[in-house]
Image (cartoon, rainbow, N blue to C red):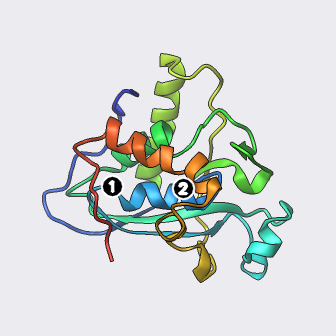
Amino acid sequence: MLPDPVADEPLMKVSGEQTAVFAGGCFWGIQAVFLHVRGVGSAISGYSGGAAGNAQYAAVSSGKTGHAESVKIVFDPSKVSYGQLLKVFFSVAHDPTQLNRQGPDTGTQYRSEIFYANDGQKRVANAYIEQLGRAKVFAGRIVTKLAPLQAFYPAEAYHQNYVARHPDEMYIVMNDLPKLAGLKAQFPSLYRRETPD
């Protein structure tokens, strides 16, 4: 179990909406994980890091567009903090020590990257990566990049809620269902069975 982020923002007293964008391998599994996190209102699979003109799956799959498969998470900061989302991201959503790959998927489009929306997110994410590195919680070095969020382009409709719609597909069984099991086991207070509409 990873430590809590020391530099996290406190939970807000009033509900609202904030956005987080994470990349860490195939977006199917990351989207599925965050849809089951309490306080998350939506999670959308898409592309970040490249230009609008080539934000399509066929182009991104070439690994030459600059895009990473990403997930845009809209969350209520009175229910879950940005640091808690980072903890989920580093614990169960992906392996931050794999460079330009995740499990069976290889290429820069599967890189580990945090696209921060503001200076507060940059500060918390940077501090947490340093904290995890000092604590040596992973066998390898954390390769997660940080970059300002320039834009997010939603992926094609057939990529959305893919895990929920294809739970028996072998790729999902092998790579994504274990992430959901990990979320439920490691984050019982954050895990929710039902996902937002």
Q: Position of residue 61 (x, y in %)?
A: 80, 65
Q: Which comes sooner in the sequence, label 1 or label 2?
A: 2
Q: Position of residue 117 (x, y in %)?
A: 48, 61
- Which label sits on residue 37? 1
- Marks 1/2: CA distance? 13 Å
Q: Nearer the viewer, residue 169 or 65?
A: 169
Quadrant (top left/top right/bottom left/bottom right) for the C terminus: bottom left
The residue at 46%/26% (across/down) is: 131
The residue at 63%/55% (across/down) is: 170
Residue 135 visible from this viewpoint: yes
Q: Quadrant of residue 54?
A: bottom right
Residue type for callout 1:
Val
Are there few (<14), some (14-19), or many (20+) residues within 10 Å of tag 2? many
Q: Position of residue 85 (x, y in %)?
A: 39, 48
Q: Secondary structure at mark 1?
A: loop
The residue at 61%/68% (across/down) is: 150
Q: Secondary structure at mark 2?
A: helix
Are there few (<14), some (14-19), or many (20+) residues within 10 Å of tag 1? many
Q: Check the image and name the residue furthest to the front.
A: 168
Q: In the picture shown, does residue 33 fall above or below 47? A: above
Residue type for callout 2:
Gly
- Which label sits on residue 29? 2
The residue at 54%/69% (across/down) is: 162
